[in-house]
Amino acid sequence: MTREPRHVPGDAPPPGAAGGLAGAAGGPVAGAPLAPRVLPGEDPAAVAEAAALLRAGELVAFPTETVYGLGANALDAAAVARVFAAKDRPSFDPLIVHLADAAEVADHAVPADAADPRVGLLADRFWPGPLTLVLRRRDHVPGIVTAGLPTVGLRVPDHPVARALIRAAGVPVAAPSANRFGRVSPTRASHVVRGLGPRVRLVLDGGPCRVGVESTVVLLAEGRAALLRPGGVPAEAIEAVIGPLATPATGRAGTAALAPGSAGTHYAPGARVEIVDPFDPADRPRLVAKPGERLGLLAASAAGAAAARAAGGPFATVVVLAPDGDPVVVAARLFEALHELDAAGLDRIAAQPVPAVGLGRAVMDRLRRAAVGGQ
Ligand code: AMP
Ligand code: MG
């Protein structure tokens, strides 16, 4: 196999130096190294170091058989928020959760779906490989991983470095492609270095990927079987194992929740969501509950909550996403907060806007979708 030249400009950061983490707005931290470290994926010490970074909530790029992924601990919502910040994504997409072994499906999917015999049949036949199974998620899988959906996409990748990394980390790894939004997916470590620079701490080099093969995404939740995205495993090969796959029509009511990206709304709470800025006098009248109305407040910061309380109310429920308004924390908590507000039986939710820069753009995109979809 041809190997990539190693890119180790500047070598390792001095002990205690700021790493290549994305800043709050997605930009590099001042004083951070200008490039990530690139280490050989076949070196167990490199894998161990990358695994420790993942466990500590940092981002690591690693090879899979499809493309290089930008990985984070899938169970750490703030780490996953940093993936979106590093990619400069203007919206949230569900991320595929990468597992070391098919046996781990039962850890993250509800028992009824994990025990579906078709899951075992497909796992035996196509894992490790480019097949993602979408099953109902257990509660501990953060909403930012699934873009608020009740399902999670699970896959065992067929790359020895990916599997060694996930196994060593001891956590499932959520990973989209390791490129900035709108750019070509990386198939070499050098592409990741060029595209993300210091936004990622470490790149494990596993040589060039097999190019251009995305995973096939199949929904098996609640006894259904549907092809959500064609990919590396042909649909016919899957049908030969488990029978016919439905193809959900895009835009049809109900399919938005199953095939994200196929409709504008994604997950929207039952209550009407309004974007209301408590610091804008023109918006403040909408912070006052009408007689008999159950009004909820989704505040981005403690200051926003205080301003809203001073200007209006009463609020049946108040959720503050981040005391200091840190966009990473706001993004990490957003989906759970929408679910929490939804469960509170509200008529209306006043949602405080955040500056639409960096991760804030994705947060505002989601709030706007919730505002449209909740009508
Ligand atoms: P990738 O582009 O390979 O990173 O895969 C991400 C894609 O996987 C998403 O855009 C969806 O098409 C699909 N996907 C991941 N999780 C889910 C889910 N819970 N429900 C439906 N599709 C999913
Ligand atoms: Mg991509």
Image (cartoon, rainbow, N blue to C red):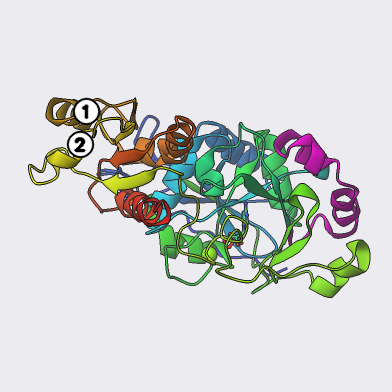
Image point 33% across, 39% down: which residue?
349
Lower position in the chain sequence, tag 1 or tag 2 = 2
Where is residue 164? Give x, y as percent. 72, 44
Q: Mark 1 touching mark 2, by CB under 8 A? A: yes
In the rendered image, residue 264 lying in the magenta stretch gets the answer no
Where is residue 163? Give x, y as percent. 73, 47
**Principal SS element in the magenta part?**
helix
Q: Amino acid at mark 1?
A: Gly
Residue 195 visible: yes
Image point 61% across, 64% down: which residue?
67
Q: How many marks?
A: 2
Residue at the extreme left of the image, as rendered? 281
Numbered badge on residue 287: 2
Residue wearing tag 1? 313
Numbered badge on residue 373: none
Highlighted magenta segment, given as a residue range: 103-131
Crowding near the residue tagged with mark 1, few <14, some 14–19, many ≥20 C-alpha atoms within 10 Å: some
Crowding near the residue tagged with mark 2, few <14, some 14–19, many ≥20 C-alpha atoms within 10 Å: many
Image point 64% across, 71% down: which residue?
249
Where is residue 335? Give x, y as percent. 46, 41
Where is residue 322? Give x, y as percent. 32, 30
Distance in Å between CA atoms under marks 1 and 2: 6 Å
Circle 1: element type: loop
Q: Nearer the viewer, residue 322 or 187?
A: 322
Say left or right for 290 vs 103: left
